Image (tube, helix red, strand yellow):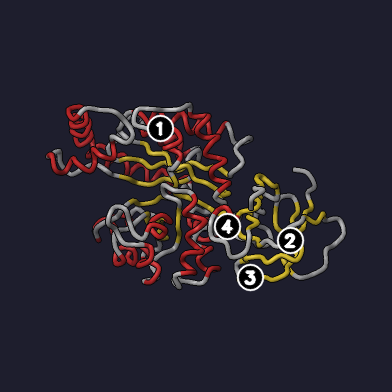
Amino acid sequence: MGNSKLAFQDIDVLTPDGWVKDATVLMEEGHFVQIDSNPLPQGFVAQNATGLRMLPGIVDIHGDAFERMICPRPGVTFPLEMAIAENDRALLSSGITTFYYSITDSFEPGLRSRATARQMIEIILKGKDHLRANSQIHIRHEQANTADFDELCEWIETRKVTLLSLNNHLPPSTDDETLIRYTKGLRQRIKLSDLEIRALIEQALEQESEGLQQLEKLVLQAQAAQVPVASHDDDSAGKVALSAKRGVAIAEFPASIDLAAQSQAYGAAVLMGAPNLVRGGSHVGFMSVEAAAKARVLDCLCSDYHYPSLFHAPFKMAEMGLMEFADAWSLVSRHPAKAVGLGDRKGAIAPGLEADFLLVKPEESLPSAIAAVYIQGKEVARFTGG
């Protein structure tokens, strides 16, 4: 790791208590030890950050843009090792220092199959020595995928998986109109005929009941292993009540302000996608991040399907007057870290926490403003154009 005692001087730093101007930031053995205005003590090596600001590294707990690096066109796939290495670089260029690979565990063949999930988990866990971003596994389990249930339980029990979300994207029936939207999304990932798609969905619908029984066991397994559980796309009061009963910690993309407020009321953190804000609304017709922020039912932002949006979103929120920048930045750092149980390690620039941070040009809102990325006090990326 090089010198274990690093320091930055005369730099504006965003801390949990707000901005500290012209601060001295001390780091030792990969952790922050002091943020104040005192002179540089002996033994610390000062780093040059003239004209830059220091922000906490971004904690992204739901992102699947890596899928397009694996499968850029339907039925066209690239080696997983290559795609994950490419993804690691993409994360750093967007300021993401902790990333939860949101791997879909579905009944589909191909990209979102159990076989692909199994390979990805193995590659990511074995590759942690050369992956620079702090890489975690988030399994998005589809209820209708009932195969190899014991394997899924083992992933949870051994904490190979550190975040579990409960998904059910099946259409309610197989009539032609209902299948249109589902088929459109499916064909972005795999090549199947209309008859093959219908057969796949009919078989999955037959597995829903068994899948629900397995899912309830899986929730108990996650609670025993202290793996946080997330709901997904809750679009009714009944689904929110079920999430509350299951002890869900994170409500991913609730459909409305009322449902988000109900999720917060039982203790869940409400997670929404940064692309929703950057694009000006939800791509599936749910509530907007802007509306959620105004109603104060928003706790965390994630990249969802577009990494650069997560860096840009806090700047845009401040520009729109939705909240102060410091509060907006906590939506991409401190709050998601807390939601997944990492609040005592990551997500903020504070004594005792791991020194994950970004050096950025002041007042610039695009990821190109990032000059350098540090994880556990080590520089892992530097951008000469920053």
Q: Secondary structure at mark 3?
A: strand
Per the model, the C-alpha gap separating discs 2 and 4 is 24 Å
Crowdedness near tag 4: few (<14), some (14–19) or many (≥20) residues, C-alpha within 10 Å: many
Residue 267 lies left or right of residue 196; in this view the side is right
Identify which residue is drawn at 77% across, 54% down.
6
Sequence-wise, the earlier of marks 2 and 3 is: 3
Q: Are marks 2 and 3 in contact (CB under 8 Å)?
A: no
**In the rendered image, which residue does mark 1 sit on?**
71
* Sequence-first tag of 2 and 4: 2
Q: Position of residue 49 (x, y in %)?
A: 73, 58
Q: Nearer the viewer, mark 2 or mark 4?
A: 2
Q: In front here: 277 or 5?
A: 277
| Whether residue 373 can be seen here | no
Disc 1 crowd rating (10 Å Cα; few below 14, some 14-19, many 20+) is many
Q: Residue furthest front?
A: 385
Task: Write down the residue under mark 4.
Answer: 347
Amino acid type of the residue tagged 2 in the rendering:
Thr
Q: Residue at x 47, y 60 (%)?
A: 313
Is 251 left or right of 82, judged from the image as shown? Answer: left
Three-letter amino acid code at the position of disc 3: Trp
Residue 50 marker? 2
- Whole-number angstrom distance, CA of label 4 to CA of label 3: 15 Å
